[in-house]
Image (cartoon, rainbow, N blue to C red):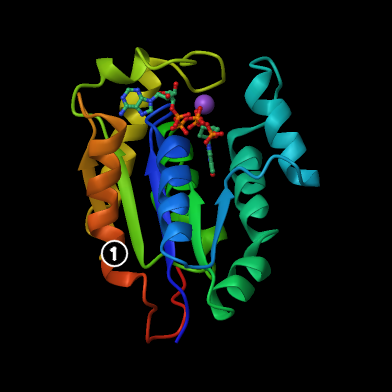
Amino acid sequence: MRAPLIAIEGLDRSGKSTQTLKLVRRLQDSNRSVKLLKFPERTTAIGKLIDQYLKDKKYKLSDESVHLLFSANRWELQDKIIDLLTNQYIVVVDRYVYSGVAYSGAKGLKFQWCLNPDLGMPKPDVTIFLKFNDMLQVTTRSGFGEERYEESEFQKKVCAQFKKFEGFSEWHNINVDNKSIEEVHDEIWNLVEPVINGINNDIQTF
Ligand code: T5A
Ligand code: NA
């Protein structure tokens, strides 16, 4: 028996941080051990480079090298994720491999090329994508536009890339248009509740 890995995905400012925090609190309230990780993890050596790249729109780095940095940033935490899951800690990740593939795919890099560096990373048992059907709503969210990629045409391309994961068995879309934070949280909880008592199989990998 091991704990589940749960990923929350979405476009910029779609509410991932709000929702992952609420989910973690609810799991703690039901006496579960839980750990929240956020990608990019901006505090590591590689994470600091990524942070600079995201904040400074003039910072030059080829698309391929940025892609590999985001992947390397996840590999920096691979051991930790496995350790936590085997020690019965539910791990909630705020963005993960899917973001890596979708954002680089939106720049024109090939899907399989993008996924390759993450092959071997632990695969979530449940992945929830916070989906805007009305793409205009994303641009009205507070803070939108501050960082690289926060531009509506690019977000549309990213959204199209995320669609490629719809065939993955762990993938679930939740429509967030005009939904309150509470409504979205309840839908997330319905998807997460079935796995909170643990998973019988070994940790799966990409
Ligand atoms: N990236 C990331 C890659 O290119 N490759 C990769 O491999 C990875 C991992 C930074 C960038 O890096 C890219 C993707 C990103 O462009 P990030 O730090 O996760 O990644 O940046 P953001 O996605 O922008 O994260 P944010 O924290 O800014 O957005 P969140 O977490 O989605 O949104 P949140 O919860 O902060 O909410 C945003 C605002 O909306 C409000 C909140 O109160 C907040 O003000 N809000 C709602 N308003 C109305 N209704 C609701 N239901 C709401 N829910 C939240
Ligand atoms: Na952002």
Write the residue at 67% across / 45% down.
69
Pointer 1 residue Cβ closer than 8 Å to ligand 1: no
Write the residue at 22% across / 58% down.
167
Determine the image quadrant of residue 48. Answer: top right
Residue 198 vertical position relative to residue 36 in the rendered view, above or below: below
Residue 88 vertical position relative to residue 122 in the rendered view, above or below: below
**Residue 113 seen anywhere in this rendered image of the structure:** no
Binning the other alpha carbons within 10 Å of mark 1 as few (below 14), some (14 to 19) or many (20 upward) gives few
Write the residue at 54% across / 60% down.
118
- Provide the residue designation for mark 1: 193
Picture coordinates of residue 164, whole percent (x, y): 28, 48
Q: What is the secondary structure assignment of the residue under circle 1? A: helix
Picture coordinates of residue 8, whole percent (x, y): 40, 48
Picture coordinates of residue 127, whole percent (x, y): 34, 56
Write the residue at 44% across / 45% down.
20
Q: Left or right: where does residue 37 sit relative to residue 130? A: right
Residue 201 vertical position relative to residue 180 in the rendered view, above or below: below
